[in-house]
Each structure stands twice: as C-alpha cells, then as structure tokens.
Amino acid sequence: MERTKYTLDEKEMPTHWYNIQADLPEPLPPLLNPVTKQPTRLPPPLFPDALNEQEFSKERWIEIPEEVQDIYRLWRPTPLFRAWRLEKALDTPAKIFYKYEGTSPAGSHKPNTAVAQAYYVKKEGFKRISTETGAGQWGSAMSMGAMFFGLECKVYMVRISYEQKPYRRILMETWGAKCVPSPSKDTQIGRDILTKDPTCSGSLGIAISEAVEDALARDDTKYCLGSVLNHVLLHQTIVGEETRKQMEKACAYPDIIVGCVGGGSNFAGQFLPWIRDKISGVKPDMRIICVEPTACPSLTKGPYAWDYGDVAGLAPIVKMYTLGHTFVPPPVHAGGLRYHGMAPIICHLYKLGLVEARAESQVGTFEAGVKFARTEGIISAPEPNHAIKVVIDEALKCRESGESKTILLAHSGHGHFDMAAYDAYLSGKLVDYEYPREMVEAALANLPKVD
C-alpha cells in the first residue's frame, strides 16, 4: 500500500503567493465606484496600501514577508492525505487525496490571509481592525492574526451563527477580540435594520456593511475581509502551491479538484495554482468543481451581474454571480457559505467555462460528512461537507465506469465547533432549505443600475 500522509519539510514551504491575474486568458472586469458607477480602485481608507496594490497586481509571484512566513510555520506546511479508508468503503477505483487545513490554530484555512492582512495593517502604523464573520472561522482567524501583531480587533458575527456557535465567540475573545452579533446596535446600519426587523438573523452582506462603517468612522482602523477579494484569494494560494509539491511526492496529478465555495477563497487557494495548467494546455481536461449550498446558490442560480458586495452599498460594485446584495439566506449550518455573491476571479473563470459549479442540500452533505468521519476520522466543518458529498459522488461514478480518476479535495477545516449541527443531523432534526426563489427575485430587483 502507498503512503497515507504526504508532508513537506518546513524548508519546503512556498515563499511566494501565486497571482492568477498574470495568467488569465481575459482580464477581470473592473470595479465600479458605488456612487459614480465608473471604474475605480478599492477605497484607500479601507485597506492598507500594500493590499490595494496586490488587489490589482499582474505580477505572477508575490513574495510572502518573512514575518508572515514565521507565523505560518506554526502550522504550515499542512498535510496531504490519501483517503484509503474512504476509497475502500466506497469500493471505488478512484484515488482520493485531501489537503487538510484543519491543523491551523484556528482550525481552518482562514489564517493564511488573516495573518498576512494583520501584518500589513501593523506595518502601515494602524492599531485596530474591524471585520465580519459568518460561521466564525474568519473571525477566529482574524482575532488570532491581530493578536500576533498586537492589534485590537472588532468582529461583527452574523447573528444566526453567533447564536448557533457560541464557542467561536469565546475563541475570538480568548485571543483578545471583541465579537458582537450582526445586525448590532453599534452601527447606524445595524440599528436601522433592527428597527425594521428586530429578529433579523443577519447575513454576511449586513455584517460587512457594519464592519466597513466601523472602519470608515475611525482613523486608527483598517477593514479586513476574509474572502471574495483578489488579494485574499492570492494569500490562500500557499495551499495549492504546497499541494503541488505533495502530489508530486505521491506521484499523482489530479483529474478532478473539488472544494466548497461561499465567497470563494478556500477553494481558489487550492485550485488557482493548478488551473494555470489548464489555461496553458498542460492539463486541458482537468475538472474543477465548485460546490455551494442549495439554500444560497449564487453560481448555479444567480445572474452574472454588477452588484454591491455589502447590503449598504458602501463597497465597490463588482461583476459577479449574485443573488442580490439584500438577500438574507436561510439559516443553514454552513454559515461560511451564506454569501450572496462570489469572488470575481471565480465568477470570471466560471463565465469562461474553466470551472464547474454544483449545489448540494444540507442533509446530504452531513450524510457525506459522517461517512468521512467514520472512515478518515476527521469531523469536518459543515462547509467542506458540501465538497465531500461531491467527491463521494464522483468516486461512485468511477466505480460504475471502472475508471481510476485521481480526485483532490480541498478540505478547509474541522467541525469541532459545529457539534450542534451534527446533533441535529444524527437525531433526525436537520432539514433542507431550498432555493428561495421569491426572496432572490425581490433582492435582484435592487441591483445597481449600471450602463
């Protein structure tokens, strides 16, 4: 039997992030000013200058600062596993590998960009960070990143997740951050929403608006975002760059790469270093499958349109597959996948036909997650369960056809803070939420008018 675990020495950790913008067959659509609707760059008051530069850079390789590399080494390189036990349980000829990001102190992939963003905020002399979080993975990571660089951190956590996942809040507070449920009474946007709907369960779009308002109101604060933006996806490419080295050690190359997408940074971090082989013609038949929830299916159900990244319309307008910036998704447990839009880079690649998209329902993904736990031993977060479901489906197709495909799973993190969701599934109380067509149509009516 071949090895089960493929590791890299600390000295083999990549020293540069990979920038897909250098290799896109067509350039990304521009950002638009939320007021004038004209092409713009990111608002300088929100982000450190270095991140603004990275957002628009066409440089293929961007060096990872040594101070960031030093913190990365606390958990990186992360392991790549061959899922022998899952393969045996499925009786499939497919070879299944998974890159596991759950070994970070925060339990997910999010620190890869949180540490980098905190570094740039500190380097440019600011003292405080405001941010939002859905299920809490990003808020946890940003709290940890801020702690490493001696920064204050305020986290606006989507209310339904704040209530479902109290231990995430405690994790953030242990690292020194302040976490409040969103919508909150701490911002004008939050107060306005609560006046209209005191029981609002929140959304990432609302939480982003609150965090942006917070940052714009203070001279000592910068805003940090955990997904969607180009520089965030850039920082995550260390995952895929490590995986390329590990797959080489395994004498394997993926035919199919699968990952979950909400805003898109987790999966993009894995597949962007590979998709350059598809673009260049080295591996033209590689399949890249983005998996989202049926309750919030931006790629599979949303139009490709100009829309705001937040509810209040404070952020630039971007071209993306969207369900409408005012859409409030149903309260699925995969809180990290409840964003109304998708990363412009992923949307662009989807539009060009270079990646696929699939939507999966909540109950089926937990069934897949339990099978993964009972074979590989890892209890996954609700988000990667969506990808695990598709990996299993593709492996079963291989069993039916007799083909031996190599499947690579982007596994974004563990589910140790999601036991309430597993309890609901195991006790038969977990329910599916379908695509709320009427709510989406109402939200799409609020798309910005762009000529």
Image (cartoon, rainbow, N blue to C red):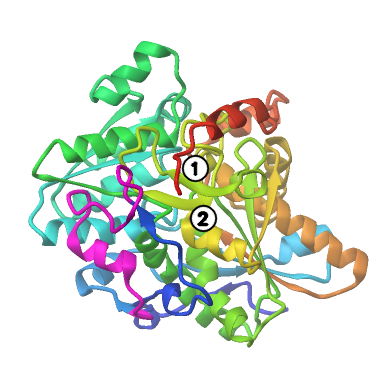
Is disc 1 surrounded by few (<14), some (14 to 19) or many (20+) residues within 10 Å?
many
Residue located beneath label 1 in the image: 336
The answer to whether residue 184 is magenta is: no
Position of 34 with respect to 246 (left or right) is: left
- Type of the residue with mark 2: Ser
Q: Is residue 288 above or below residue 109?
A: below
Residue 220 rendering spot, x and y as whole percentages: 9, 44
Residue 117 rendering spot, x and y as whole percentages: 26, 58
| Secondary element at tag 2 | loop
Q: Counting residues from the N terminus, which is met first, the one under dot 1 or under dot 2?
A: 1
Please tell me which residue is depicted at 34% across the width and 44% down the height of the picture: 140
Please tell me which residue is depicted at 60% across the width and 32% down the height of the picture: 440
- Type of the residue with mark 1: Gly
Please provide the residue range marked out in magenta: 33-61
The answer to whether residue 49 is magenta is: yes
C-alpha gap between disc 1 and disc 2:
11 Å
Please tell me which residue is depicted at 17% across the width and 49% down the height of the picture: 45
